[in-house]
């Protein structure tokens, strides 16, 4: 097998693994909430909203607040076992790209990260 064929084989394998993980709908509600919390607080930190005298005193307090927010947005009764991996990825990308100023956060939360989208896979129960 030539060097270029081996490279193409490796690239193809990586693409297949990436595609398989993107299609995986087994993300738990807790994992989705944790990912959204982490990214939300990283975004607030990048927007200079974390620190003494700011919206959040530190990353820890931001995470406590946002974990509670995501818990309300994606309640167990509606989302247990129903996280759509594709819609979660759309939501997480929106969080990463949310503008620091303005009402962009409202669009992110109530459109891109809407419960009806993120909790829509109808998969098997995820245990949490």
Image: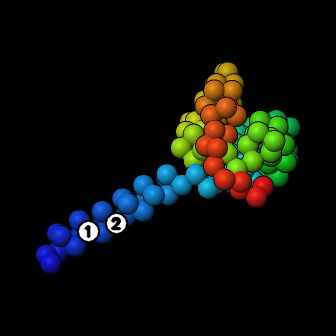
**Callout 1 crowding tier (Cα within 10 Å): few <14, some 14–19, many ≥20:** few
Residue carrying label 1: 9
In front of the other: 110 or 122: 122
Residue 32 percent across, percent down from the top left: 68, 49
Residue found 42% across the figure and 55% down from its top? 19
Query: Which quadrant holds residue 99?
Result: top right
Horizontal side of residue 52 vs 74, given as left or right: right
Residue found 57% across the figure and 47% down from its top? 85
Residue 33 percent across, percent down from the top left: 73, 48
Tell me the SS state at disc 1: helix
State yes or no: discs 1 and 2 in contact (Cβ < 8 Å): yes
Residue found 64% across the figure and 44% down from its top? 122
- Quarter holding the C terminus is bottom right
Residue 13's mark? 2
Residue 39 percent across, percent down from the top left: 66, 46
- Residue pushed farthest left? 2
In front of the other: 117 or 51: 117
Tell me the SS state at disc 2: helix
Horizontal side of residue 58 vs 114, given as left or right: right
Disc 1 versus disc 2: distance between alpha carbons? 6 Å
- Residue pushed farthest bottom? 1
Q: Can residue 72 be seen in this view?
A: yes
Q: In this view, does 107 lie above or below 47?
A: above
């Amino acid at each position: 097998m030539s060097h270029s064929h081996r490279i193409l084989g490796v690239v193809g394998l990586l693409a297949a693994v990436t595609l398989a993980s993107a299609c995986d709908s087994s993300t738990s509600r807790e994992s989705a909430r944790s990912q959204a919390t982490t990214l939300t607080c990283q975004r607030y930190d990048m927007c200079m909203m974390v620190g003494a005298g700011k919206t959040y005193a530190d990353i820890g307090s931001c995470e406590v607040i946002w974990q509670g927010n995501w818990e309300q947005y994606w309640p167990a009764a509606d989302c247990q076992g129903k996280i759509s991996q594709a819609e979660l990825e759309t939501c997480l990308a929106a969080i990463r790209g949310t503008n620091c100023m303005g009402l962009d956060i409202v669009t992110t939360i109530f459109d891109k990260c809407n419960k009806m989208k993120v909790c829509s896979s109808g998969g098997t129960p995820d245990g949490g």
